[in-house]
Structure formats: structure tokens, C-alpha cells
Amino acid sequence: MPICAGVLVLAGLFLLSMPVFAAFFSFNIFAALSLMGPQMLSIIAVSILDSVTTSELVTIPLFVL
């Protein structure tokens, strides 16, 4: 049942014409907070910082430019 609810929430965000990256990001934040509580925010912040500073991912925006 939770999977169906998640699919419906994402479909609703898409129907509101929210961009895909923003819909997935907001859904992931909401799901993490509801499943693991407020301590998950620090884990998400560290994860985002680690993925932004990865040298393999830095080349993608430079290639697009």
C-alpha cells in the first residue's frame, strides 16, 4: 500500500506541472522525514555535498557548457 501512495503522490506532483527533479527531490525529503525523522536532514545534506563534490559528476555540467 505505501508504494501505491508514493506513486499517487508523484503522479499528483507531475500533474501540478512540477519539474521532474523538484518532484522527486520534494518526495524524497518528505519520505525520508516521515520514515526516519528529523535526523535524516543531516544525512541528506551530507549526501548532497558528497555527490556535488564528486569529480566524475563535475564534468557533466562542464560538458554541457
Image (cartoon, grey):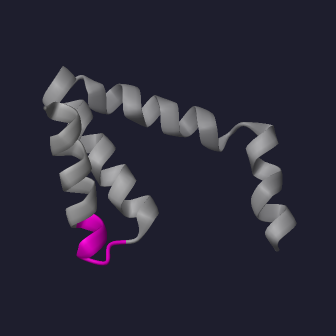
Span of residues in magenta: 13-18
Total numbered labels placed on residues in the image: 0
| Residue 54 showing in the rendered view | yes
Q: Nearer the viewer, residue 36 or 11?
A: 11
Q: Position of residue 41 (x, y in %)?
A: 29, 33
Residue in the picture at 26% in, 48% down: 7
Rendered image quadrant of residue 21 = bottom left
Residue at 78% across, 56% down: 60
Q: Quadrant of residue 36?
A: top left
Q: Residue at x 72, y 36 (%)?
A: 54
Residue 33 lies in the magenta-colored region: no
Q: Nearer the viewer, residue 12 or 51?
A: 12
Picture quarter with the C terminus: bottom right
Q: In what quadrant of the picture does the N terminus appear?
A: top left
Image height of 45 relative to 40, above or below: below
Q: Is residue 22 left or right of residue 8?
A: right
Tell me the residue at 83%/53% (across/down).
Answer: 59
Question: Please, is residue 19 above or below residue 25 in the view?
Answer: below
- Give coordinates of residue 20: x percent, y percent: 43, 64
Q: Could one spot residue 37 in this view of the protein?
A: no
Could you say where residue 25 lies in the image, as x and y percent from the top left?
37, 51
Instruction: Give the x, y percent position of residue 40.
Output: 28, 26
- The question of residue 15 being in magenta is answered with yes
Q: Quadrant of residue 12?
A: bottom left
Q: Is residue 1 left or right of residue 32?
A: left
34 on left or right of 15? left
Is 23 or 53 nearer to us in this picture? 23
